[in-house]
Image (cartoon, rainbow, N blue to C red):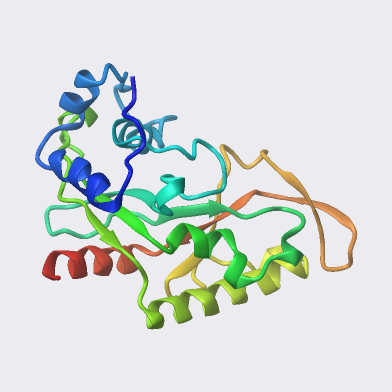
Amino acid sequence: MSESAPQSERELLSRAGALAGWSLGEIANAYHFPLPANLSGHKGVIGDLLEHVLGATAMSRPVPDFESLGIELKTVPVNRRGRCAESTHVCTIPARGAIAEQWFTSTVRHKLARVLWVPIELDRTLKIDARRIGAACLWSPSDEDEQILREDWEEHMELIVTGRFGELDARSGTYLQVRPKAANRDALVPVSDESGELAATLPRGFYLRPSFTTRILSDCNTA
């Protein structure tokens, strides 16, 4: 049984802080949450476990995980030097209808307005259940961070709304990048191309670069 939804930031941070130092297996056993033997085909299971334990309410809806608090949960694998090991998924990009989106009402902005970051030990010699949970922190982007995120988002969205999907490149964007998000290369979705004709492309998502999330965690630890 999952926890009830936290009623305040303080309560949420207290719950997350109580998990620090415990292994994923210990937490999963305490909450009768089944963990797979590895992450192959189960990439989101760690986030699912923490959502279950901390009382997230969003489920699969495009709103912050703790909807009443406006807080998104992000679990990030970090190595022994405290560096994030991979890009962090923010949200899926709508294949159609994106033309109506503006930065101030965008899913990306809502998702990143307030984030609970929970680092997870990354040691490939350890099984998933032996990996430990690190110290959580709450973060909001500074004015400078938001300006850069907005510029990245607008650059990517210009290509998306004009159907120039072939120009989308994970190397673009200072903090925010676009990457494919599909089970395989055959998982195509219908889109309108640059000429307005019906076409097909891989589904994509917005992701934060590892260098940016590493800086966020470092700032949290020194605050």
Measuring from the top left, give residue 13's x and y in whole percent: 22, 49
Question: Is residue 190 visible to us here?
Answer: yes
Q: How many marks?
A: 0
Measuring from the top left, give residue 222's x and y in whole percent: 12, 70
- For the N terminus, the image quarter is top left
Quarter residue 193 falls in: bottom right
Indicate whether 88 appears above or below 58: below
Furthest toward the left, the residue is: 21
Residue at point 59%, 38% (across, down): 184
Question: Is residue 164 visible to us here?
Answer: no
Indicate whether 107 appears above or below 6: below
Residue at point 12%, 53% (across, down): 80
Residue at point 20%, 39% (across, down): 124
Measuring from the top left, give residue 9's x and y in whole percent: 29, 52
Residue at point 37%, 71% (across, down): 141
65 or 69, nearer to the observer: 69
222 or 131, nearer to the observer: 222
- For the C terminus, the image quarter is bottom left
Residue 59 appears left or right of 187:
left
Quarter residue 216 falls in: bottom left
Residue 200 appears left or right of 158:
right
Measuring from the top left, give residue 130's x and y in whole percent: 15, 30
